Image (tube, rainbow, N blue to C red):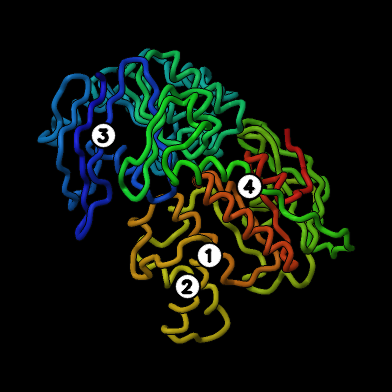
Amino acid sequence: MILSLENLSVSYGVGPAVSGITLSVAPDECLALVGASGSGKSTIAQAVLGLHRPQSRVTGRLSIAGQEMAKATEADWAALRGTKVGYVSQDPYSACDPLRGVGHHLREAWHVKGIWPEPGWAEVRLAEVGIAEAPAMADRPPHAWSGGMLQRACIAAAGALTPPLIVADEPTSGLDADRADRILAAIRASGAAILLISHDLGLVRRHADRVMVLDGGRLVDGCAVADLYGQARHPATRRLVQALAAPALPPREATCRTPLLTAKRLCRDHPGGRRIGPVDLTVRTGEVTGLVGASGAGKSTILRLISGQDAPDAGRIDRAAALRRPGAVMPVFQNPAASLNAYWPIWRTVSEPATVSRRVRRSARRDLAADLLARVGLKGADLDARPGEFSLGQCQRIALARAIAAKPLLLIADEPTSALDTVSRAQIADLFAALRDQGIAIVLASHDHWMHDRLEARAVDLN
């Protein structure tokens, strides 16, 4: 076996994050771990890579490519990473040096092992994963890349030294379905065994050999992928599968809706001569506008323009006077962990928008935060916890709760469900529908066609 875990447990402080995990991955096999946000999927990935938190306690047996790692030192882990096990992070922005070109990230995979590849090697690998204009893009820092494009670069870096095992933590969360399939197919074609952590059951069904289900930090179900949609043996599995077929929302009555924002011939130029646009769109109250397009088509760029974070190079944007109120336009960013203050307890983060124009007592802020967190599916969350204590999917819901706290007229959401499991995704879709029906305008950029269809989004195609 390339990977073998026996009775693995990881504890942070008081209680275990995961407990009694036993699994194995054979050469050339893809094993998928699925489960709700916060169920422990990323904790297992971190343990397999020796990247668990310093204060954590890890017990049980862990073997990678025949090497026992249960009592390994940091030097042992450093020698193993890259050569025996590659890693595709759930958050590509945090995986890259923000001040260096992305090509440096790929070359560093070799340099840390004392190997210097041929000139142009990084650019070739970027082109292999579908990055257009790879030589120019390699010199640009991460913030100049879309999330999906940057994730593809990280996938190229993970396989730089052809390790026999790749741990892929939500590797396609920022990619459209076609490109996600091609990327997973490319990883599988490399011959590496894969521990795939994903909430995308469609992707799992198409590419994994076996699937195991986590619930509350324990493995509760496991089967061949072909049996996943059959008679599920555990309620957690049934919840995940049934959420894919959530009943349609009731049809909405046609009404006359007020335009809040109109963009005409909107364009944004990128270095190297690439232009996004021209784009025309009208955003109306109580309506969802969906930006669709392949990874790198410019969805995030257009969101930044209409939210006022960037200025267009051509075209114009007309905004209703009501949008000038602080908090009237609220973004939900594609990278939620980076958008939350790492040092603030979540009650302070979530309730902060409510204090923009008035003083609010601490007790009232905590009550508001608890109510908003419950609305996004985090009822009972520890209000004093910091963002680092939550999974990326949970951080996305915290960011959404913060946006709602401002009572916005326009909500701008960039891939709001990319880090969520199917159950959480259905909850967020219902919440968005409720906000829409309250008259809030929503501009949604997402590869999730299910989300667009469920919200009856008016599509703006950027391909």
| Mark 1 touches mark 2? (CB < 8 Å) | yes
Vertical position of residue 297 compared to residue 226: above or below = below
**Quadrant (top left/top right/bottom left/bottom right) for the N terminus:** top left
Image location of residue 305, percent across then percent down: 68, 52
Residue 96 appears in the picture as rendered: no
Q: Quadrant of residue 383?
A: bottom left
Residue drawn at x 15%, y 42% is: 59
- Report how far apart the C-alphas of labels 1 and 4 lie in the structure: 23 Å
Mark 2 or 3, nearer chain start? 3
Residue drawn at x 54%, y 38% is: 174
The residue pinned by badge 1 equals 401
Instruction: Looking at the picture, tell me which residue is in the foreground, 412 or 178.
Output: 178
Numbered badge on residue 49: 3
Mark 2: amino acid: Ala
Residue drawn at x 53%, y 19% is: 127
Image location of residue 420, percent across then percent down: 50, 47
Mark 1 or 2, nearer chain start? 2
Numbered disc in front, either 1 or 4: 4
Q: Is residue 62 left or right of residue 215?
A: left
- Report how far apart the C-alphas of labels 2 and 3 lie in the structure: 35 Å
Residue drawn at x 85%, y 63% is: 257
Tell me the crowding category of disc 1: few under 14, some 14 to 19, or many 20 or more residues within 10 angstroms, Cα based: many
Mark 1 or 3, nearer chain start? 3
The residue pinned by badge 4 equals 246
Q: Secondary structure at mark 1?
A: helix
